[in-house]
Image (cartoon, coloured by chain):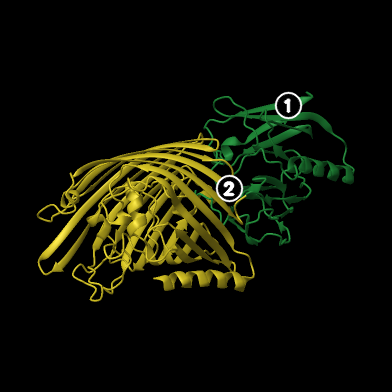
Chain colours: A yellow, B green
Amino acid sequence: MPTLSRGASMITLLAMAVTGRAADWELSLDTRAVTSDAGRSFMDGGLGTTRFDRNDSGMQLGRLRLALSSPLGELWSAHLDASVWDDKDRSPVGVTEAYLQFRPYPRAGYRFRLKAGAFYAPISLENRAAGWESPYTLSYSAINTWLGVETRTIGLEGQLDWLGTRTGHVFDLGLTGGVFGWNEGTGVVLAGNGFMLHDRQTPVFGRVGPPGVGVLPFQQFDGRAGVYAGVEGRWLDRVVLRFLRYDNRADATSMDTVSGAIAWNTRFNSAGLRIESGTGWTGIVQWLQGETYIEPAPGLDFAWPFRAQFALLSKRFGRQTLSARYDRFEVDSNVPDGDGRQTGHAWTAAWMFDADAHWRLALEWLQVRSYSYLRTEFGGPPLATETQLQLAVRYAFGSGVR
Amino acid sequence: MRPSTRPHRISCATRGVGGALALLALTGAEPLWAATLVISVQTPDGRALSGAVVTARPLDTPPRRPAPVHAVMDQVSRAFAPDLLVIAVGSTVAFPNSDSVSHQIYSFSAAKRFQLPLYRGKPYPPVQFDQTGVITLGCNIHDDMLAYLLVTDAPYFGRTDARGAWSVDVPRGRYQVSIWHPRLRESDTDLQRELTVGDADRADLQLHLLKSLQPAPINDRPHSWDY
């Protein structure tokens, strides 16, 4: 809700005032020249798998982003990430993350961390840059696009790390657990649109799609908290391996009496591996498998099992990065007429050039080939090949950009 | 750890040996420089290992403690500078912060446990290191920051140069030589050697590592990425 966004902004500003210490801030503007032959974008209520459709060719706003972080004393800090996406959400400015972090000093090789607020669960190995962006491509993989659209931890997360690399070993290990609310809508976009590949993250309490038709992934009306638990292993600073089990524990029989929204019970397992070399190579693979289901009436349950994988290979040449990624995704359905069934794969190739700390130039080609049963309901052929080419220019400035 | 090409504020190797020399001069000991001890270290593939810490202890005479120094380990571009210091036991190290961002440095190594919040422009008193050993330093805000302090009571110590060599003038006698490097995979005892500095002007010790080093930390990753 906008109240939370305002609340988070207030917390950050208050933090700055209380500590008397200037917050770190960053403002960036990302503009795009786009050419696309894709079907109507999800933000216009369509079934296109890319962010920009054939009516969006031309200049577009990629993202206008403001990030603030401020210490609150020695061990606490406040973080806020707000963006304008130039689309039709409920509010022109959306907060994608806003949280407080407690970060005590490590003791005897162990460290505890606590986050409270709204933030991403530690799943993606691709979205490692500021603002949960990917430094490899403009459009995220199908897995991480979905996480950006429909998942956010609005709650608490605890993390316990064993810092082996600080005690003469070559490994670090971490355990993560999260408890969160406002998750009854998680799964609705997957069942309604299927997987997509883009970089538009749904703001906290934001809407996906146009007014009247769009859906709200972040709602709370069943009185149940979701949970996740994950483990992470690292070898030096070269290899990261992650597993996470997520269950929003939504009561699939629950319905919001005011909006008529149904609670989507969504569970998944995810795994990821990232390997980096000392010569600029990066390889990432991620895997996701789960199911979302609803039970609008006793004995009437609809389930959409889903799975997706991707492999990304990237090479850094000084200030330039070349990346290629292959995605595969599938949503199944037990609905008798196959409602929501989707299969597809995608190729992404991107060149990024960080001219200096302020300017970044990027060129990305993305082609998605997918079958979607829902397209036939709109009178189209179920199979589509969609190609999108983007040229992005981003300018960033702030206290930490130099 | 960041590239070792960053200019070091002080050279502790020089100061350590210089301190030992000064101590000798003060105590009026005989100038018994009989020979040059040259230690060179090679990786298993035959390449020179630069930056390795070498310590040499006389075995025939009672150990003489090296003179403490005042060293500096700065924070520059979200990295410790330098990322490795060898200091005599009893030395102090100042940790200024030349960055525009705050750091919170810590160590939970047995030789010295401490934590320091380093806000920009706010100096802290130097930290004294009274116990020998390796101290691993990290930053509680920036996980990719990593540095080492090696605190030694050996009278002779230093680091190998680009040719993998370190040399020092020492009196005749038997010496125990030890090698340390943050990326070594061999144990300390595997890399201890005894040698005798005899009648010749020069005594050479060549050490060949049997195991390759751990990979060096990636240092060209943008700071805004998680690591």
Task: Name the side, left or right, on which B8 lies relative to A334.
Answer: right
Name, please, the residue furthest toward the bottom.
A257
Q: Evaluate whether residue B57 shows in this view.
A: no
Say which quadrant the N terminus of chain B sits in: top right
Q: Residue at image x 66%, y 53%?
A: B99
Q: In this view, does A54 lie above or below A70?
A: above
The residue nearer to you, when weighing A374 against A335, is A374
Q: In which quarter of the image is residue A202?
A: bottom left
Q: What amino acid is found at the position of numbered circle 1 in the picture?
A: Ala
Disc 2 target residue? A358
Task: Name the side, left or right, on which B140 lies relative to A330.
Answer: right
Q: What amino acid is found at the position of numbered circle 2 in the picture?
A: His
x and y percentages locating residue A220 in the rendered image: 31, 71
As drawn, the label of residue B203 is 1
x and y percentages locating residue A161 in the rendered image: 46, 57
Q: Is residue A166 above or below residue B8?
A: below
Secondary element at tag 2:
loop
x and y percentages locating residue B211 in the rendered image: 52, 32
Secondary element at tag 1:
strand
As drawn, the label of residue A21 is none
**Chain name for mark 2:** A
